[in-house]
Image (cartoon, helix red, strand yellow):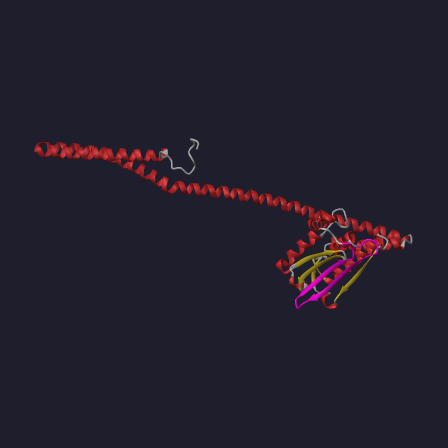
Amino acid sequence: MSGKKQADDPPSSPPPKVKAVRTALVIYLWIGTILLLLIAGCASYASSDPNRSGRISTGMTILLALLAPLLALGFAALLARLLWRRLYAPLLIQIQRLKEQVSGLMETAAASEKQISRLEAEKLRSQINPHFLHNTLNTVQWLARLNGQQEIDRLVTLLVKVLHYNLGKQSMIVTIGEEIESVRNYMELQRIRYDYEFELNVEAEAEVLSAAVPRFVLQPLVENSIYHGAGGGGKVDVIVARQGADEIRLMVKDNGTGMDQAQMDELLAGEAARGRGLGIGLTYVLRVLRMCYGERMSLEIHTGESGTTVSILIPITSRGDYDD
């Protein structure tokens, strides 16, 4: 082993402050002992000759009068130092630590406030851009109608509806009926774009249409089905049905060739959605479902040669159950 002293080893000598206190105690003990010996010697000397007792008593009184304040000050200083070491120094150390902790918390709060301000700015920007986009599209729509361009009018009308639903200032919680209507508009928009290469089939039980669901959870799943499974002649099925007494299952199925593990990982990581459609994929769906339902929800993906199925199970709720 090296000659360096380990951190856990006991110190070879006491700290300088401890040594100073010990030295002061020893000095005061010696002074006290000398004084006691001096007093004892004077008493013995006075007892041997009664004529000296008066003078010696007077001298002792003067000596004690001079030494008593010095001894009192010395003991008071020693006592104050001991109290400082035992009581006040640890208290000041604790106060300093609390001060550092408060300073750290204030720095963290300042950083959080800065982050909140940035997010608020981004939120305002995201609200301004759709407003401008909607107005511009409405202008295009009216120009198409004036020029008799019915197909362009229909395309722009569907696009405005989809953007208004996904980007507008609406509640985060909608009904399943509203979510399905948005999916139909989005799918029709895509069918026009891709020259009707695929079709959409929706099966939804009437009793679940009024149940609550987070906005924009089905559309990303349909979008993934279009880009992964429903090519030429493909089909996307959206099925919504009650399961048991208090749950609803939402399924999005395609008849594609399925996905391998790499494509599955890409889908779950959100990479598959970038640059396609509205660019919001399965990661958003998972995040919003967990935020609303916690452990009460589940999402499963089954893929094979006959296609891919994304299945979501959520509890039955109503809009009144959410503070939104």
Q: Is residue 169 above or below residue 247?
A: above
What range of the chain is rendered magenta? 230-257
Q: Nearer the viewer, residue 242 or 310?
A: 310
For the N terminus, give its image quadrant.
top left
Above or below residue 47? Residue 138 is below
- Residue 160 within the magenta-colored segment of the rendering: no
Residue 216 visible in this rendered orientation of the protein: no
Kindly indicate the quadrant of the structure image that contains residue 285.
Answer: bottom right
The residue at 76%/60% (across/down) is: 238
Quick check: 139 above or below 5?
A: below
Residue 28 position, x and y percent, is 26, 34
Quadrant for the C terminus, please: bottom right
Q: Is residue 254 magenta?
A: yes
Q: Position of residue 172 (x, y in %)?
A: 69, 57
Q: Nearer the viewer, residue 285 or 36?
A: 285
Residue at left offset 51%, top offset 44%: 102
The location of residue 239, given as percent across then percent down, is 75, 62
Magenta-highlighted stretch: main secondary structure? strand
In percent of width and height, residue 228 lies at 77, 52
